[in-house]
Amino acid sequence: MEAVNRKNTFVQSVDRAVSVMEFLSRNGWTRVTEVANELGIHKSTAYRLLTTLRDRGLVEQDTATEKYRLGFGVVLLASTVTADLDVLRCGRPVCERLSEQTQETVTVAVLEGDDAVVIHQTISKASALSVDWTGRHTPLHATAAGKIFLAHMTTDQQRRVLRRPLERFTEDTIVDPAILRDHVRRIVDAGFGYTVEELEVGLNAVAAPIRSSDGGVVGAVSVSGPVFRLPAEFIPETAELVKEAGAEISRCLGFRG
């Protein structure tokens, strides 16, 4: 019973901390007493919440007035989400155009942890694929977009990912770390990554990097299609269109390389 009580207290503390930040976002510089009154808690409790948030950079305090407001740490936490929203905003019209050009399914993915996550998908009316990949986590080693992220990781990041057992999805999935490392190394020079029936039998894909203003890879745009419409010999031709799409999205994000 004691453990349950601690859990409930912890959850309540989190809820109160979020409520504090929401209140500060609406009111700006605020005194401890105002926070306590708003949440219906004792002033000492409000002070401990504000102090903890301040120490973590989520709240800042004016030493002269002793008032509090949201800190720059909130901006840092939100920066990843903001970046993804920018990629989505810039990528949507480009994906629609690329889908019309290729008559295939076009997706935009971002890196989340050790997975590639699809944040946008455009399906051509002529496409033979109808699966909605939006929001789906996909493996780095068996997807074209995932290979883009692998290729542009730091050596330590890549080594950590490849150190774990790589799941085999089809007979063509590359599960040997050494072979995969050589494979993704060529992606940097080529400017695109691809898979040939490595995630699903009968499915091929081509992807290119999306870069932010500082040149970092923040996403990948890819074209996926069935083998009979996107055979391996068509990959280099399709890759040129995908690379152009990635470059256009990157320019929208401020990349000038």
Image (cartoon, rainbow, N blue to C red):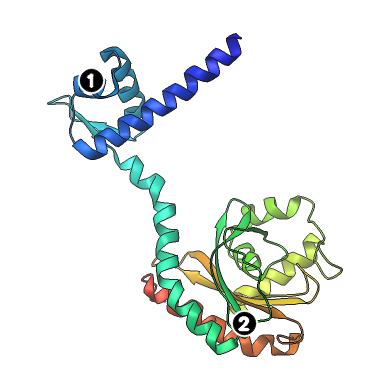
Label 1 Cα crowd, 10 Å radius (few <14 / some 14-19 / many 20+) = few
- Give the mark count: 2
Q: Position of residue 185 (x, y in %)?
A: 67, 70
> Who is closer to the viewer here, 185 or 89?
89
Image quadrant of residue 207?
bottom right
Looking at the image, residue 170 lies above or below residue 74: below
Q: Secondary structure at mark 2?
A: loop
Q: Say whether disc 1 or disc 2 marks the residue closer to the N-terminus.
A: 1
Q: Position of residue 145 (x, y in %)?
A: 62, 68
Q: Position of residue 107 (x, y in %)?
A: 57, 71
Q: Position of residue 183 (x, y in %)?
A: 73, 71
- Looking at the rendered structure, which numbered label has been put on residue 104? 2
* Quadrant where the image shows the C terminus: bottom left
Q: Which residue is mark 1?
A: 37
Looking at the image, residue 74 lies above or below residue 152: above
> Who is closer to the viewer here, 223 or 100?
100
Tags 1 and 2 touching, CB below 8 Å: no
- The type of residue carrying mark 2 is Glu
- The type of residue carrying mark 1 is Asn
Looking at the image, residue 143 lies above or below residue 2: below
Image quadrant of residue 70?
top left
Residue 40 is left or right of residue 252, and the answer is: left
Q: Secondary structure at mark 1?
A: helix
User: What's the CA distance linking mark 1 and mark 2?
Assistant: 57 Å
